[in-house]
Image (cartoon, helix red, strand yellow):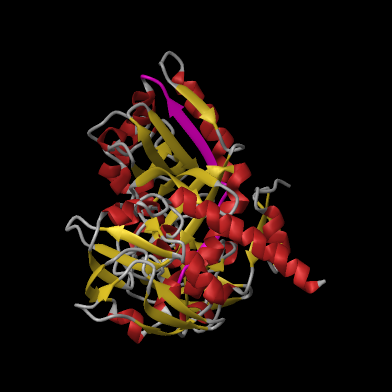
Amino acid sequence: MKKTPLFDIHAASARRMVNLKGFARPVEYVGHAEEHRAIRERVSLCDVSHMGELEFSGRDALTLVDRLITNDAARLDVDQALYTVMCGEDGHVIDDLVCLRLAEDRFLWVVNVTKTDEDYRWALKHAQGLDAHVRDRSAELALLALQGPYSSEVLQKITEADLSKMAYYRLAETTVMTDETEVRCIVSRTGYTGERGYEICVSRDFAPCVWRALMRAGRPLGIAPHGVAARESARTEAGYLLNGNDMDDRTYPHEVGLGWVVKPYKDFIGREALAAVAERGTPRKLVGLEVEGRPTIRHGCPIFKDGERIGQVTSGPLSPDLLDGASSLGLGFVASAHARDDGVLQIGVRDARHDARIVPCPFRERRVRDDARVDTLSPYGLRYGEDHLWVGTGSDGRATIGLTDFGQRHLGEALFVELPAPGDRIVRGSPFGWLDAYREPFDLIAPVSGTVVAMNTSAVERPGDINRYPYARDGLIRIEPGDVGEIATLAGPAAYTETTRRLERYDSWSRDLRLT
């Protein structure tokens, strides 16, 4: 059984581990239903390092990639990704994958764990005679999925990339800041849950420190890790497919609603076969299923109509306990003649048959394109004072002042904040307000001088927002700087990070000493 680089973390915190597709995988940490809700309502982190990664480079890399996949890689900009399938000559699906364009002549595929070796051999076979190099990087890389409505606010605390400018299926080669070191990574706005989210691809050696950094950054926003149980229920609810369940090497893309990734105007392996399939139709279709009552349907359950078997369930379970409803949901194949049937079907669960019907899919609106809940800044673009306040400058020449992530964590939950009003003058090195926090009251010492032009009223009305969004674009106050040269004298992000690491080490050492 293989282990991801995060195995020790899972073994220490997961309730249960299983051997899934040859990898030791956590099933759940705090409970399936709670982890499912964390994905939908807050933010959640999942280890998906079992996935495979193939890299294509060289002068003919695009030619090879476009020949292998049904979607159009030539239309990708650098730092853009697409979802696609790869088919054989007969038009059947070999694998579904995400293709990232990292440069004009460099691509990275994220492929399914059970298909990695097959995909690699297939790509090597078709690379012969081309100036294209194919590498299997699965053993070198790790992949973390940060998903949920507050995923942007969590990740922005530690990454250099400006997530406010990253659209759906766009990416950046950037860095993330951890306690140990600054880590190079690829951040893509992708995911498998139907929520706004990101996937972070890093060297395997650095995966544990990135995991810990994300968990710490997400704590004020209620982050929870999720295992394969919640990953499976979230993707099914969003109508996303699982290779090996909802499709295999006898499936055409058109049978499972993936005709949209087949671009007949370009040349690719299986094009002729799929053109014929599109013209004649398919004998079966993948549909959404709703079962009356509480029976949980699972992969392989038979589907009947008027006593005749017409298909089988491919994905579940989505039980009422997860959906706050009175029925169970899943995906399944039915004969095409019944794919639009409004009548009652039956699904066999153990020795009984339960009434069911075909319903629209996805079962929940996908929110992958939603804007971030709060507009936050990257800490990499700010300057820092000695008293853990940050300063950011805008195009209008005005400056915003806020409390750093380190500052809010060491003060604890903010209970009350007093800020100056517009028109008030603040002086560098002097208090301009104060914060009453769980651990201690804290004077807000001005890192620069100037005149207040606005204060963040939401921070006054909801002091806890200071903990949740330390790098909110509105900060605590906005000022007209008295001397812009003062800002340049403040510490940059690298120097400030080194200071906080030194303080963290001291705090840890002194805590141990106090306990003896």
Residue drawn at x 35%, y 43% is: 81
Residue 484, quarter of the rendered image: bottom left
Question: Is the residue 147 above or below the residue 31 in the image?
Answer: above
Measured from the top left, where is residue 444 in percent x and y?
41, 74
Q: Can residue 481 be seen in this view?
A: yes
Measured from the top left, where is residue 448 in percent x and y?
32, 63
Q: In this view, does 392 lie to the left or right of 114?
A: left
Residue bounds of the magenta highlight:
42-59
Residue 121, quarter of the rendered image: top right
Measured from the top left, where is residue 92 in percent x and y?
43, 40
Residue drawn at x 45%, y 57% is: 192
Q: Quadrant of the C terminus?
A: bottom right
Q: Is residue 317 left or right of residue 241?
A: right
Relative to the observer, which residue lies in front, 420 or 396? Answer: 420
Q: Is residue 135 left or right of residue 205?
A: left
Question: Is the residue 274 above or below the residue 468 in the image?
Answer: above
Residue positioned most to the right? 516
Question: Is the residue 407 above or below the residue 293 in the image?
Answer: above
Relative to the observer, which residue lies in front, 397 or 79? Answer: 397
Q: Is residue 337 magenta?
A: no
Residue drawn at x 32%, y 39% is: 71
Relative to the observer, which residue lies in front, 105 or 495? Answer: 495
Q: Is residue 41 visible?
A: no
Question: Is the residue 74 above or below the residue 3 in the image?
Answer: above
Measured from the top left, where is residue 352 in percent x and y?
59, 77
Residue positioned most to the top? 129
Q: Does the magenta stretch include residue 43?
A: yes
Residue drawn at x 50%, y 23% is: 124
Numbered disc total: 0
